């Protein structure tokens, strides 16, 4: 059969089955990659517009998350001053730099949580998502990705204010800024995969809060979120190296606050790609089994 | 059909000082019966409470692996602060926050009419109608931590200290209610304020450390804007014999001012409310 023969015949009504039972598309189909990019761009745009619409709510959310790093910063700066100016080489200025960058990394780490999954399953929201042409994870990545753009814009004045208040010691090179700009999105992808995987547990049980809390505690201790990993005991640092968490918090922060060699800077991006791939494979495997269990009642 | 010239007899309202408590008790019983249907939630709450406590203790251990005191507070004194913070957090999550999130949703969806049309004070009803009894697990955890901290302290707790602690914790609890009520009432103007829960949860974590640890601008914010100083640090100071009576009196006066302001602000907010029902 020639290539021309595969074109829809003018005699065939679009949307009706052609000979052999194959359905003709209503509209000419774009390429897969182009379609996907189109979906991502549209979801991004919608999220950005919605995000800017609710600026006050967004700031409430961001201010709520500021408390945590400020607490850590104040406590560790106090200890550093009491100890004569530094703790394990960290001065108050270093702590300020670490925790101010932390505030942006934390925002980038916000992904669809298992609590959201509980709601999706309970309310039967998955049914609608299954009818869409793309895997639901793409919509989550794109929607929350657009939200990040709003977050970064709204974060800038906060960072400026924190800089005036806490005087960070920060002088990143162009390479470090470049790697940081990629690493924060890498962190977003790694955490998306982790929490998607955890969220899929809701297909078996709709009560995942305890599991999620346990995950959050492990993440808090082994990611660099609580304190720079260098200040943790040796066994904790070793354990952190074989877990995905430090690539979502400690590593992106350290790309900007300095102290990493070029090999560590670029090797870290590789580790983020590795953990994203492992997470994506995990999601693909569990999703296939999970979706078979899904039943929905509604109109 | 209403007869011509018919005047409904206004209800005779006697002064009943315990009426608000009776109404709160009725709602508490209904809420408790509702929650008791889901007993598995108790075990989930116990697990989460223990996890949260574990993190608090791990942070304390990490801090005191580097120093022997923090801004003049010893390890056992900071354990007392942690206990008070967990205790107050349990109170807020059991009695205050569920009501405020309910109120936020009602204002946004125009369903507040259901509370406002009842023959009782609107502010009272929206403040007592929801109770999450399993969250009270944190109140028990906080009390246990507090007792352990007391046993570790060098000095004995006197009757005056204990009474000052009880007074301070009640004053702090009232102030937190006022803070939540004022912020939630802001929804009459701003409508979508769901993120306020995140804001509170974040800021409340600062109560794990005495407010004196924080820089001046933050200390002022945590005293007068979000009353963490009065709700957590002051009761902990009472137990560790650091509290002077002037602070307690000041807190009492401030709590009355907060309550009066909350009442005024609620009434202002109500004027802006227009229900969405037909």
Image (cartoon, coloured by chain):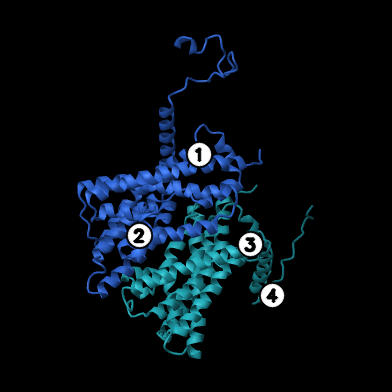
Chain colours: A blue, B cyan
Q: Nearer the viewer, mark 3 or mark 2?
A: 2
Q: Badge 1 sits on which subunit?
A: A
Label 1 packing within 10 angstroms: few (<14), some (14-19), many (20+) = some
Please tell me in which quadrant of the rendered image residue A77 appears: bottom left
Do pointers 4 and 2 mark residues of a single chain? no
Q: Which residue is depicted at the point 44% across and 37% down?
A: A43
Q: Is residue B244 left or right of residue B123?
A: left
Q: Position of residue A163 (x, y in %)?
A: 26, 59
Q: Badge 2 sits on which subunit?
A: A
The residue lying toward the viewer, choosing from B274 and A138, is: A138
Q: Position of residue B115 (x, y in %)?
A: 64, 59
Q: Position of residue B210 (x, y in %)?
A: 39, 75
Spatial separation of the CA atoms under disc 4 and disc 1: 60 Å
Q: In this picture, is B159 found above or below B28?
A: below
Do pointers 1 and 2 mark residues of a single chain? yes
Q: Which residue is depicted at the point 57% across and 41% down?
A: A289
Spatial separation of the CA atoms under disc 4 and disc 3: 43 Å
Q: Mark 4 or 3 closer to N-term?
A: 4
On the question of residue A110 being in view, the answer is yes
Q: Nearer the viewer, mark 1 or mark 2?
A: 2
Spatial separation of the CA atoms under disc 3 and disc 2: 36 Å
Residue that mark 1 sits on: A136
Residue that mark 2 sits on: A238
Please tell me in which quadrant of the rendered image residue B207 appears: bottom left
The residue lying toward the viewer, choosing from A62 and B187, is: A62
Residue that mark 4 sits on: B14
The residue lying toward the viewer, choosing from A177 and B171, is: A177
Mark 1–mark 3 contact, CB under 8 Å? no
Residue that mark 3 sits on: B40
Do pointers 4 and 3 mark residues of a single chain? yes
Please tell me in which quadrant of the rendered image residue B3 appears: bottom right
Spatial separation of the CA atoms under disc 1 and disc 2: 35 Å
């Amino acid at each position: 059969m020639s290539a021309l023969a595969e074109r829809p015949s003018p005699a065939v009504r679009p949307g009706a089955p052609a000979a052999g039972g194959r359905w003709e598309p209503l509209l000419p189909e774009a390429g897969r990659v182009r379609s996907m990019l189109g979906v991502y761009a549209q979801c991004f745009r919608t999220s950005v517009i919605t995000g800017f619409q609710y600026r006050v709510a967004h700031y409430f959310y961001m201010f709520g998350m500021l408390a945590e790093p400020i607490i850590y910063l104040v406590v560790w700066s106090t200890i550093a001053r009491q100890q004569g100016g530094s703790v394990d080489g960290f001065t108050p200025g270093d702590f300020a730099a670490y925790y101010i960058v932390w505030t942006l990394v934390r925002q980038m780490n916000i992904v669809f949580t298992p609590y959201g999954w509980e709601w999706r399953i309970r309310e039967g929201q998955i049914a609608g998502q299954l009818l869409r042409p793309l895997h639901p994870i793409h919509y989550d990545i794109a929607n929350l990705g657009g939200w990040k753009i709003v977050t970064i814009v709204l974060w800038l004045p906060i960072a400026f204010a924190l800089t005036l208040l806490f005087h960070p010691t920060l002088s990143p090179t162009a390479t470090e800024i470049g790697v940081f700009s990629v690493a924060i999105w890498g962190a977003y992808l790694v955490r998306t995969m982790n929490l998607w995987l955890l969220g899929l547990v809701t297909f078996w049980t709709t009560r995942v809060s305890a599991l999620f809390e346990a995950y959050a505690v492990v993440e808090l201790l082994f990611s660099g979120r609580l304190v720079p990993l260098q200040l943790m005991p040796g066994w904790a640092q070793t354990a952190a190296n074989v877990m995905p968490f430090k690539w979502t918090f400690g590593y992106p922060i350290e790309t900007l606050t300095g102290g990493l060699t070029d090999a560590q800077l670029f090797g870290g991006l590789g580790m983020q790609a590795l953990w994203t791939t492992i997470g994506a494979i995990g999601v693909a495997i569990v999703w296939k089994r999970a979706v078979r269990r899904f039943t929905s009642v509604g109109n | 059909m209403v007869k011509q010239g018919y005047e409904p007899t206004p209800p005779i309202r006697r002064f009943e000082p315990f009426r608000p408590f009776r109404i709160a008790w009725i709602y508490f019983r209904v809420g408790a019966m509702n929650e008791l249907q889901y007993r598995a939630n108790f075990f989930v709450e116990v697990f989460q409470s223990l996890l949260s406590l574990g993190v608090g203790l791990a942070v304390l251990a990490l801090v005191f692996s580097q120093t022997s005191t923090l801004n003049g507070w010893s390890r056992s004194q900071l354990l007392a602060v942690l206990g008070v913070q967990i205790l107050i957090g349990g109170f807020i999550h059991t009695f205050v926050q569920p009501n405020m999130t309910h109120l936020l949703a009602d204002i946004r969806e125009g369903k507040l009419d259901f509370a406002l049309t009842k023959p009782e004070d609107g502010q009272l009803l929206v403040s007592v109608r929801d109770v999450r009894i399993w969250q009270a697990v944190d109140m028990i955890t906080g009390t246990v931590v507090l007792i352990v901290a007391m046993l570790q302290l060098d000095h004995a707790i006197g009757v005056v200290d204990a009474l000052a602690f009880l007074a301070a914790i009640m004053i702090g609890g009232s102030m937190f209610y006022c803070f939540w009520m004022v912020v939630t009432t802001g929804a009459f103007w701003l409508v979508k304020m769901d993120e306020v829960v995140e804001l509170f949860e974040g800021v409340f974590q600062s109560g794990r450390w005495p407010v004196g640890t924080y820089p001046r601008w933050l200390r002022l914010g945590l005293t007068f804007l979000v009353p963490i100083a009065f709700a957590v640090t002051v009761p902990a100071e009472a137990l560790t014999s650091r509290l002077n009576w002037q602070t307690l009196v000041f807190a009492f006066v401030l709590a009355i001012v907060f309550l009066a302001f909350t009442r005024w602000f609620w009434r202002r907010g109500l004027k802006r409310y227009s229900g969405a029902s037909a």
